[in-house]
Every structure is written in structure tokens, then in C-alpha cells.
Amino acid sequence: MHSHTFSFFLGVVFAIFFCLMICLKKKEGKRYDERQQIVRGIGYKYAFFSTILYFSVVALVSEAVEKQFMTRSAEAIIGLCLGVAVYVVYCILNDGYFPINENRRTLLISLAIMGVANIVIAVNQIMDGEIMEDGVITEKCSNVAVGALFIVVFIACIIRNAIEKKEDEPS
Amino acid sequence: MKNLRLKAARAAMDMSQQELAQTVSVSRQTINAIEKGDYNPTINLCIAICKALNKTLDELFWE
């Protein structure tokens, strides 16, 4: 089996495992209050329109320059990461991402680890020149996109923590 | 507009935002947003806050 295909397979298995863990934890009674649900709804809206805008711009630019500069898979991966980033960053900055009384430390640590791991792989791929083939960005840019996503989310968490510390009541 | 009556009622009960938030099952930031006037709560949350602070809706939320 090709090493990239194997890595991709491992990534998919890990993602399914991670999603299952999140779903099982959700059943333990995590919940959002009414303001957080509104924030999450607005976040979904912004993410939806950002994704539509992104795909429209990519399609228009490809038509205008009459040259494909990304493979279809790369386009989709970057679009998905953009949509997720818009949603998560909006929700974090407006305090709609973490359920009530959620311990954020575990999530912050896992975000940092996944971000750094993806960035390390991405740097290796960039140095080996694997990201681009014949001037076209390939689906191997997924580590760059996902790494950037996790780092952006991690930074948003740090900004939110700073805002909360500033907002904390004096009592 | 800031809800100073809510803040005063909470302070009179010697409750922190976190304690009030836990009593009415919302996040501390939601209580903070209501006090700052950034969020307009639903009637259900208004009633829960009033019960927690032993106040009426008129006393806390009516202009």
C-alpha cells in the first residue's frame, strides 16, 4: 500500500475514533444554554456563507485564469477547513463553543498537539516539495490546512481566555 | 442597556456571577452578558433568575 494512502487511512480511522469519543461524551449530559445556542446558530450561518463564498471565488478565479491551480480534492479540503475555522473561531470568541462547566484544558492540549503534529508533517512535505505537482496544489496540502486550522483555533482559545480574565468580576 | 438592578440584587444576595449561573444552569458569560445588556434573555431564564434571587419579573426586568 502506498505510504500516503496508508497515512490517509490512519487519519480517517483516528478521525472516526475522535468523533465517536466526542459523541459518547455528549451523551454524558453536556449542554449549551440559550445564548450559546444562538451564538452557535450564527456561527453556522457565517461558516455556511464563507464556504459558499470560497467555492465561488475559487471557481471564478479558475475560470478567469483558465488554469487549474488546485486539484478538486485540495479545493474541497481547504474549503472544509475554512468553514470549520469560521464556525469554531466565531463560537469560541463569542463563548458558544464550550458547553457549560466544560474543562477546556484537555481540549486545548489536544488542539495544540494535533496542530503541531500536522504542522511538522506539513513542513516535511513542503521541504520535500510534495505539496505542488506541476504548479498545481495537490490534496497533500491537507496537513497544512488542518495544521493551520488547529493553530488558529488554539489562538482563538487563548484570546477568549484573555477576554474572560479581563471580564471577570472583581468580587 | 445595562441591567444594574440584576447586578444589585445578585450582590445583595452575596452571590457571584458564577454562583448565579450555576443556580439557573447557564454559563457565567451569559449572566455577565445580561448584566451588561449585551443579551436579552428569554422569559424562562428571566423567571429562573427571579426565583434564584427572590425577586419579581417587574423588579428585575421591567423598564
Image (tube, coloured by chain):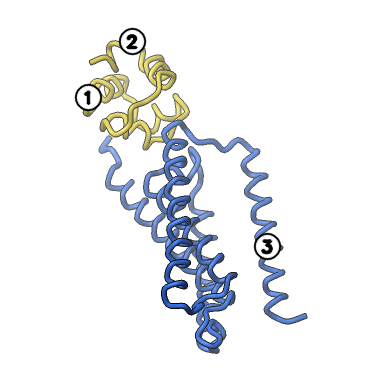
Chain colours: A blue, B yellow
Q: Is mark 2 in CB contact (under 8 Å) with mark 1?
A: no
A104 and A65: which one is in front?
A65
Q: What chain does mark 3 sit on?
A: A
Q: Is mark 2 in CB contact (under 8 Å) with mark 3?
A: no
Q: Which residue in the protein does label 3 denote?
A: A14
Q: Which mark is residue B56?
A: 2
In this rendering, the answer to whether A113 lies above or below B32 is below
B29 and A165: which one is in front?
B29
Q: What chain does mark 2 sit on?
A: B
Q: Is label 2 or label 3 in front?
A: 3
Residue A63 x %, y %: 46, 72
Q: Is residue B31 left or right of residue A144?
A: left
Q: Amino acid at mark 1?
A: Leu
Residue appearing at x 31%, y 29% in the figure:
B34
State the CA–CA distance, disc 2 to disc 3: 52 Å
Q: Quarter of the image containing the C terminus of chain A?
A: top left
Residue B22 x %, y %: 45, 29
